[in-house]
Amino acid sequence: MRDETYIRTEEKKLLDFCHSHDALYIYGAGNYGRGYLDVLHTKGIAVDGFLVSEKQREEFCGKGIYSVEEAERKECGNLGILPAYTNSRPDEIKKRFAKASPDVLDMDHRVMICLDDEIRFFPILDRLDLEFGVSPQWEADAKLESILVIRLDAIGDTVLTTPFIRELRKNNPKAQICAVIRKQNYFLLKNCPYIDELFLYDSGLIDGELADQSRMYDGIRKKVEEFVKENFSGKHFDAVFLPRELLCGRNTVEELALAYGSGAKYKIGRIMDNEIDKRFLYSRMVKSFSWVSLQGKPMHEAEYALNLLRDCGYAIRNADMELWPDDACKAYADAMVGRLRESKEDIIVALGIVASVETRTWRVENYKALIEECYGLYHTRVKFILLGGKDAVEAAKELHGAIVMDLTGKARLDQTAAIMEQCDLYVGSNTGLLHFASAFGKPSVTIYSELDDGLPTDGDSPFRMGAWQVPHIDLVPHAGLDGCHGVCRMGRSHCINLVTPRQALEAMEKITALKT
């Protein structure tokens, strides 16, 4: 296979580079850095430590962390650098050294991910296949009486799955459809008319590359076994669907373990054909799953899941997202929004001030400037409701004022959804609240950490993860700070702040036809 040949060629380049240098440093102390260390350790190659642009700790994975200046003072001689962060550029790394002239390896990071998956993940998949057996091939005319859907993810990603669940129901009107979701998302789907039974899985959000999550497998497996025994005893599933991309993102190993543990006859999932590591996983997963949809065309995350159903032979009639707040939640929303809305001309703006990832969070002083400038132009005609969980409470305190209602940390998810249904516009980060707005057909102005030169398949891409089927304006930084390319690589609020409050206000004016 051509991909396999490419992987082995890049692997040899990595090993030859490491063997030819007296000192070896990995530039970047994150998931990629851990992966390189893992691969090299397996090959018997030691590294001298990690290099970082901004030093915030002294150690990572048992190795020292150094600044470029500290590494230069060591007078290492023949120095080799392995870049280990997204969109790294060897020429830019070389320029950061004032004294030394290091060799910097120019390598496809995705090959390292393939090598790390071979070490950490493939043995787990082999064990699962041996224990539970390989699933039979999917039959497009299969009659399914009982279906399980698994989605252990954040709030917004759960909302993105609602079109998939509805269309799965329409294609299997008589089937018993069950779903496993994180218990934190219960209020999102508790009134879903397309699900017969919800199973609530108690889990935090486990980040990291697939190989990184695989390190936790023994603990995950024990937890899954207890969950299956408690919830699936006596149940039979004809098929289990994993609508999120297989083996990519948070809680992916847990989802896989649950899929096997469910005992479902058919296991069905999808993988994007956009990177060599995804094709590498696909070539392995098709040996174990009944059907793995290989999706090559960039599209919205909601559409990816619907395409999985199309590939299974199902018809898709509607791609809209949905939410189902009950009458009590709607009454709560009426009362809250009614306090702000004084006339039909008022515009109520829902602000999502904190994202689940700090990189995607616009600084609170930007929101403060936006609110103040808006008040200066439109006085009380535009009013703001601050929404979010407990993590947004402190930031919200800085935004209190006459035209601001603070509901951060106060409203449940279903109450928050009902509030969004009463608002006229969403403004804020790419977070679950954005998808609440899309589910109710509300326009949005969204501020992204994804850069102008990012890929449409990136995890914070407006194209893939943005507003869906509604009018929207996406505000994206046109260039990165401090060497960031494609996506912001800093674990803090950084490149996103290149978007200004003035840009946000102009977008609000455009999408609502506000006039002074």
Image: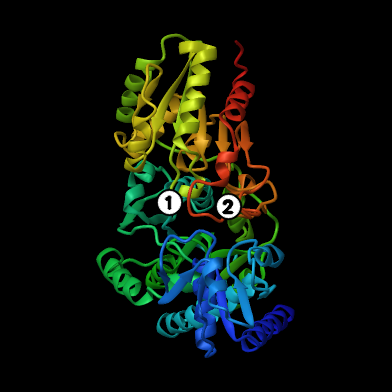
- Nearer to the camera, 220 or 7: 7
Task: Say whether marks 1 and 2 touch (CB < 8 Å).
Answer: no
Could you tell me how far apart the alpha carbons at marks 1 and 2 are, in whole angstroms? 20 Å
Q: According to the image, label 1 marks what residue? A: 154
The answer to which of 169 and 107 lies nearer the viewer is: 107
Q: Position of residue 459 (x, y in %)?
A: 57, 54
Mark 2 crowd level (few <14, some 14–19, many ≥20, 10 Å Cα): many
Above or below: residue 140 compared with residue 289: above
Query: What x and y, as percent, mark residue 83?
Result: 61, 70
Say which element carries label 2: loop
Sequence-earlier tag: 1 or 2? 1
Residue extending furthest toward the right: 2
Q: Nearer the viewer, mark 1 or mark 2?
A: 2
Q: Residue 41 placed where, x, y %?
A: 50, 85
Instruction: Tell me the amino acid under the disc marked 1.
Output: Ala
Q: Is residue 239 left or right of residue 412?
A: right
- Would residue 285 be visible to someone looking at this image? no
Residue 146, x across and y down, in percent: 42, 61
Can see residue 44?
yes
- Tell me if residue 310 comes above or below residue 441 in the rendering: below
Which quadrant of the structure image shows residue 25? bottom right
Disc 1: CA contacts within 10 A as few (<14), some (14-19) or many (>=20): some
- What amino acid type should be assigned to the residue bearing mark 2? Cys
Name the colouring of the figure: rainbow
Number of marks drawn: 2
When the figure is inspected, residue 198 is found, relative to residue 91, above or below; the finding is: above
Q: Dividing the image into 4 quarters, which one contains the N terminus?
A: bottom right
Q: What residue would you read off at disc 2?
A: 488
| 265 lies above or below 324 | below
Q: Secondary structure at mark 1?
A: loop
The residue shown at (47%, 61%) is: 55
